[in-house]
Amino acid sequence: MTTIKDALSRVRSIRILDGGTSHEALPPVFRTAAQELARETGAQVAAGVIRGEARLEPGAFYLSPWTKDEPPASAPPVEEEPPGRGGPPSAPQTGEEGILLRLTPDGSGHLASSHPSLLFGFLTHLLRELVGEDVAPLAAEKVFRPAFRWNRPTFDFFLTQEGRIQKGLDRESYVRRLAESGFTHVEVNGLAFPRALETGPPGEAYPMFYTYCPALDQFVESDLGAGLYPKEYLEANLAFLRENAELARKYGLVPGLLSFEPRHVPEAFFQRYPMLRGARVDHPFRSFKPRYNMTIAHPLVREHYAQMLRRLMEVVPELGYFSIWTNDSGAGFEHTQSLYVGRNGGAYLIREWKSQEEIARVAGENALRFLRVLRDAGREVSPGFRVLTRMESFYGEHDVVWGGLEEGLEVETASLAARGWEMPYTHPRYPDSSSFPAGSVYQESLAPEEARLARELEDRSSHAHFYFAAGPWAIFSPLVGVPYPSLTHARLKLLHDHGVEHLAHMGGTHPPHLVPFNVNHEVLRSFQFDPQGELEAVLRRMAMRLTRGKTPDQGVGPRAPARPGTVDSDSREESTGAPGSDAGHHLADTLMKAWSLAEEAILAFPHVTPLYSIYGFVWYRLWARPLVPNIEAIPLRERAYYQDHMCTTPHNPNNVDLSRDVLFQLTTVADARKALERTDANVWEPLDAAIGILGEAEEEAQAALGEENVIRDQWVRLSALRCWLTTQRNVAAWVVGVPGFMEAESEEEREGCRRVLAEMVESELANSRRLMALLETGVEFMATTDQAETPLIHGGNLEELLEKRMALMEAHRNDEPYIDPEYMERKAGQPA
């Protein structure tokens, strides 16, 4: 059998064909892909772009667009070829996405992409997944249809949000990995600074919420908003956005925006234009001063937004979409119910003493008009420009907003059937609980109502973008690279089988220098280009690759070209799983078994509260703060090392009570007790077995693969996951022990709470020591910054903080359990 690898090894010349487009219109990703293929094969990239037809001679391989009107290549029939092997490839139908591949044993052929966003991902798929297959079926051309038309990050943690100050981050390698992983779009609007310019009174947490999802006015200004922000600040932010967009173009991704809008503007604006004041949009518990946005009911303000978007698109005309998050983090729509201070806004929308129904109608229509203004302004430059929004914040205006969605106005969601933030799904292992991060691998089903509502949108030429979380931020934060490939595949298959074509991947992907073995997103790419592929075969190929001493991301950054005539230095069994060394097969089996056991533990985790399972774990410094029976018994000056970096105000009850946050009850004693019992009964056995078999194979892996190998890497990451889960378990124990003690009605109950707390302290002390040891391994298993530590990301000093934590836990382990029930009021009455 002649394999695809054999055929690629005979490629001598890689040529770019214009496909009927002008040279200027040909996206740069075709040159990027040609250079990548040349590095893998040792072939030469021909200079310039070829117009017209291509002659498919031995060793000549073409890359081109694939369009309905202009097929990418044509050639006279070759005498020796059976009928159908020559001539132009089939053209895609209008609106269809796909890759057309033709390859013959002599190294001739073409790879044509209907959309630039598919090209680099498919090329990666070809070189990693398909090289061991028989080349014969490709001689007559084969079309590969992607599983998802859109696969975009939403809240891209490392590129544009809190993690953009990650230590060692290289944005190009990150964007490249997005393309390799099968993403089609990318967010580009991040700040060029660790924080926004927003300031506030002492002790206020609110400025931190402006660090992410920056609004349009952080990049450009309108005539109305001129002078609100320093020009050098705007220029730096715009340069950062433009650089990200250029990287997107290089790898074929469609750049887009994610902002909280309509966002608060400085009070100086209302001193100039007092009658353009809109809604109060801050959270009165987290902020110490009122914050207002402009009234979008006024035509001047709507033109302000349209003008900003036009000016931004003059700089980056390739922008394809704008995702709007709202009614949080200093943003909100006037008179909507979910504004933190209640329905309020400017003077132009509705007068006083109207019914809730009337207010909801005009508030929803006002929001829709704003979204249309942005869509229409974007389409002046980019004809297919889309505006997306989340429906959760419109629970009071749901029917109005839903009814107004139309072509170019779309939604992103974990469930179309939901109203507000309550998910209509339960934990897959614990049907009495709906406590898990929405859109994650714990959401194992979709109700029939979802498909009906999605079709309703499609009938209006709109679309639903369903959340998918298998990366950073959205689950297991701050850990990175936690492997659960089968669960990732199951979530993708669920969405695909239900007709979902648009993914909104929460958190983005992982930087290659942090996560060299990007297991979950290897599955993502494989599914994107082969949704019918057998999971076992996909995992086997991946495990075999990883245990032959080669990471799947060795293409990141410059590397030496392969020897002429070879695709790379690996043997064919690397991709096919064909017989190779016994060690390679044994290590691959070990890896697959460890993944399976880890997934069993992950699904068994009950989630104490979703907030602590995502970014709240970092916000509330659960790895740095001491878990003791009476947190406030520790003097405030001794708590400052972590409390100064918590995303809380001085009167937030979370400072002393892990079961509460502002006015939310995060969990109850009864629910915490169930979480504690379920974790101890179901999580540790499979997870410890996974860690154990990896540990047993580490010496063999080091001998076969070197010191930095996938077995050691996965051992560290699963060990870190165990530390994370242990802290989650001990938070549940703290709630059982301390609030439980406060609620107890008998000495016997109180004594039981003391025993739970004594065991909890001992467990968390041991856990801190294990975590410190993992920090010494050299495997970077969590997101950290080498810039100023913020409440949204850890610094590089966690080991030092753990030492302080353990000392305080030893000193206060025997304190009487206590939470001051008047803490919030007492602290609020003290000077800031």
Image: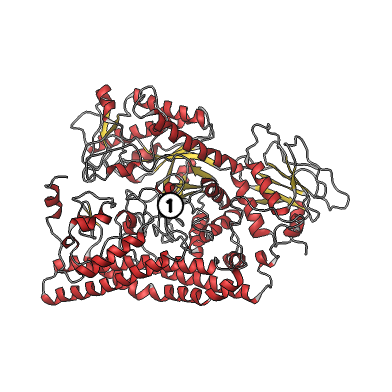
Residue 348 shows in this picture: no
Residue 566 shows in this picture: yes
- Residue sitting farthest toward the right: 79
Q: Nearer the viewer, residue 552 or 830?
A: 830
Left or right: where does residue 36 sit relative to residue 760?
A: right
Q: How many marks?
A: 1
Disc 1 crowd, CA 10 A, few/some/many (<14, 14-19, 20+): some
Q: Nearer the viewer, residue 736 or 349?
A: 736
Look at the picture and state if 257 lies above or below 780: above
Quadrant position of residue 138: bottom right
Residue 790 image point, x, y percent: 34, 49
Quadrant position of residue 63: top right
Q: Nearer the viewer, residue 216 or 806?
A: 806
Residue receiving disc 1: 450
Residue 832 image point, x, y percent: 17, 45
Q: Nearer the viewer, residue 208 or 526?
A: 208
Helix, strand, or loop for circle 1? helix
Three-letter amino acid code at the position of disc 1? Glu
Left or right: where does residue 367 sit relative to residue 669?
A: right
Residue 209 image point, x, y percent: 32, 44
Which quadrant would the N terminus be assigned to in this image? bottom right
Quadrant position of residue 623: bottom left
